[in-house]
Image: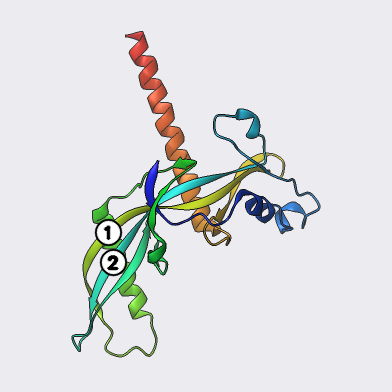
Amino acid sequence: MTSLCLPALIDADAAVRFFGRPRFGNGFGLFAQKAVLAVQDDPGTRTLPFIERLWLPSFAVRVHATSPTKREQSVWTAVEGINGEFSLLECDEELAERELDGDVFPAMIDETRVAALARKGAMLYILRQRGLLNKPVVDAVEEIRPYHYPVWVCYYRRRGVFLDVMAQDARTGRSGGPKMRISVLHALVARKKELREAAEEQANAQTV
């Protein structure tokens, strides 16, 4: 599948090292297990712990602002496509059409909601800036561009019992943090529900 996206700069080997680094959850390395890279259509590679790269949805939103002195400016922002988290987009020049490998997930919010979240997020960001006189007002959304961003996900058993996931930003190499982890979980749950409903529809069609 080809889609507008940010580049995946972290390879599988680097992701394996990242997830296997010493931390509290693995006894600071004492109980660390080396994860393997999952290969699509090969169930044998999906033995815990394993990693795979997913592509999560997002939106690049260019907002327009005007100051009381009539000075105008446009800024690219990002609205995450599952839970609607807002951030400034400082890497818009990296967006390009690329072939995506791995699972690609659709957005769960529409562009009307995205525009509202971008305007609100940009306005709150401006209001929080200290020492900024004549603060501009966000008065328009100029462009919305759907795209995908890469995430490495590690599936493992927490405390040897509970299935859990960790996430890594596959562009920057930074830890995904709780917000990215929640987005991954929501995307996986929605995909599982979609597959289950499709299987039920197919089974019902065969019995008619």
The residue shown at (46%, 34%) is: 192
Q: Residues within 10 Å of mark 1 (few under 14, many from 20)?
A: many
On the image, the x and y values in percent for residue 154 come to: 61, 46
In the rendered structure, which amino acid carries the disc numbered 2?
A: Arg
From this view, report whether residue 104 is shown above or below residue 142.
above
The image quadrant where one finds the N terminus is: top left
Please tell me in which quadrant of the rendered image residue 191 appears. top left
Please tell me in which quadrant of the rendered image residue 106 appears. top left
Marks 2 and 1 in Cβ contact (< 8 Å): yes
The answer, for residue 48, to whether it is visible in the render is yes
The image quadrant where one finds the C terminus is: top left
From this view, report whether residue 12 is shown above or below residue 85.
above
The residue shown at (26%, 69%) is: 63
On the image, the x and y values in percent for residue 156 come to: 65, 43
From this view, report whether residue 181 is shown above or below residue 120.
above
Q: In the structure shown, which secondary structural element does the residue marked by tag 2 occupy? A: strand
Q: Residue furthest right?
A: 30
The residue shown at (37%, 62%) is: 78
Spatial separation of the CA atoms under disc 2 and disc 1: 7 Å
Which of the pair 158/134 is nearer the observer?
134
Q: Residue furthest top?
A: 208
Q: Residues within 10 Å of mark 2 (few under 14, many from 20)?
A: many
In the rendered structure, which amino acid carries the disc numbered 1?
A: Ile
The answer, for residue 158, to whether it is visible in the render is no
Give the label on residue 62, or none: 2
On the image, the x and y values in percent for residue 153 come to: 57, 47
Q: Which residue is mark 1?
A: 144
Q: How is the image coloured?
A: rainbow
Q: Residue furthest left?
A: 70
